[in-house]
Amino acid sequence: MEVLKIFFYSNLRFLRERKRFSQEDFAALMGIKRTKLHALESGQTKNPTAEDLLKFSDHFKISIDALMRMDLTLLNESEIRTLQAANKTYLTGSQLRVLAITVDKHNKENAEYVPIKAKAGYRSGYNNPEFIASLPKLSLPNLPKHGTYRMFPTTGDSMLPIPEGSDVIAQYVQDWNSLKPETPSIVILKGEQDFVFKLVTVQEDGTLLLKSLNKAYEPYTVDSHEVLEVWKYLKHQTGTIPEPETDMQEIKAMLQDLKNELKIKNRNG
């Protein structure tokens, strides 16, 4: 009987050292104890948990199957990058899970509303059909026929001029690579992090660059394993009446118009 050889332990150490992490620093980054990482790398822990396997796979951007079955120490840098590229669809969420949905009596998908009080529960129940079924249902006109839609309330001022408290109607994104740079989207993040409404750009390394419309907030990057879902902005509704323009806003608009006129004159020579 052929013995099944598992390379996970040596691969884990190889990939950590390839990124020049000490055991202590890498354990802290992954949210585990250094003694646990040492036990995994030395093969003392024979059965790593599914959660740990997913963590390492997401971080190194290499499939669990490759982590377990291939001796990565025999590969050169080009071959490792090829493995990571082949794993890209996994990292974008397109094969991560099946979306939980509900349908009406005519077998048509509902559009659910995720109220603020349900936010914490949504992060743990987003793929639980019973939880999704408990959310309020909406009938929204003029939405594209093909797609899954939800409505999310916004909080904070990071997306001004869209007012705080607006309700954003968004479409589920199956493959994050399909997003054009700076696509307005609701991003559902793991753990204690909140839902965020940002301009999303998927970068070459698989991370997501999140940018606010409000320039007072700095852009930041999140790893793909920190993201549960991405919902592309379609429209929003608000009960806030826009405030009249201030004198400063009027001056800025006049200066912009003047700059545009000068550009046209310069082009026309």
Image (tube, helix red, strand yellow):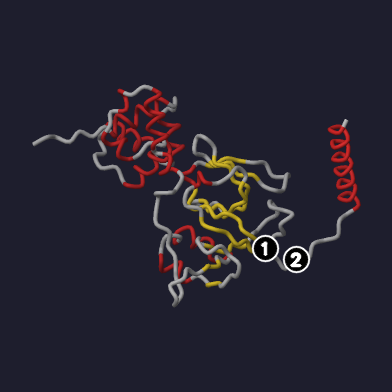
Q: Which mark is residue 153?
A: none
Q: In terms of secondary structure, where does tag 1 sit?
A: loop
Would residue 8 appear left or right of 221 to someone viewing this image?
left
- Measured from the top left, where is residue 234 in percent x and y? 61, 58
Location of the C terminus by quadrant is: top right
Instruction: Give the residue number, with chain letter if any, for mark 1.
Output: 166
Residue for point 40% across, 23% down? 77
Asked if residue 219 is positioned above or below residue 239 in the image, the reply reads above
Q: How many marks?
A: 2
Callout 1, which amino acid?
Answer: Ser
Q: Nearer the viewer, residue 233 or 14?
A: 233
Which residue is found at the position 14% from the left and 34% from the top?
A: 3
Marks 1 and 2 in Cβ contact (< 8 Å): yes
Residue 127 appears at what percent x and percent y? 42, 60
> How packed is label 1: few (under 14 Cα within 10 Å), some, or many (20 or more)?
some
Residue, disc 2: 240
Mark 2: amino acid: Thr
Does residue 6 appear left or right of residue 198 in this picture? Answer: left
Looking at the image, which residue sits at the far left?
A: 1
> Which of the 4 image quadrants contains residue 41?
top left
For image coordinates 43% across by 38% down, the residue present is 59
Picture quarter with the N terminus:
top left
Left/right of residue 194 with respect to residue 242 in the rendered view: left
Q: Position of residue 175 (x, y in %)?
A: 47, 48
Q: Residue furthest front?
A: 268
Q: CA distance from mark 1 to mark 2?
A: 8 Å
Q: Earlier in the sequence, mark 1 or mark 2?
A: 1
Residue 66 on image: x %, y %: 31, 35
Label 2 CA crowd tier, 10 Å (few <14, some 14–19, many 20+): few
Taking 45 as reference, is 82 above or below it?
above
Q: Secondary structure at mark 2?
A: loop
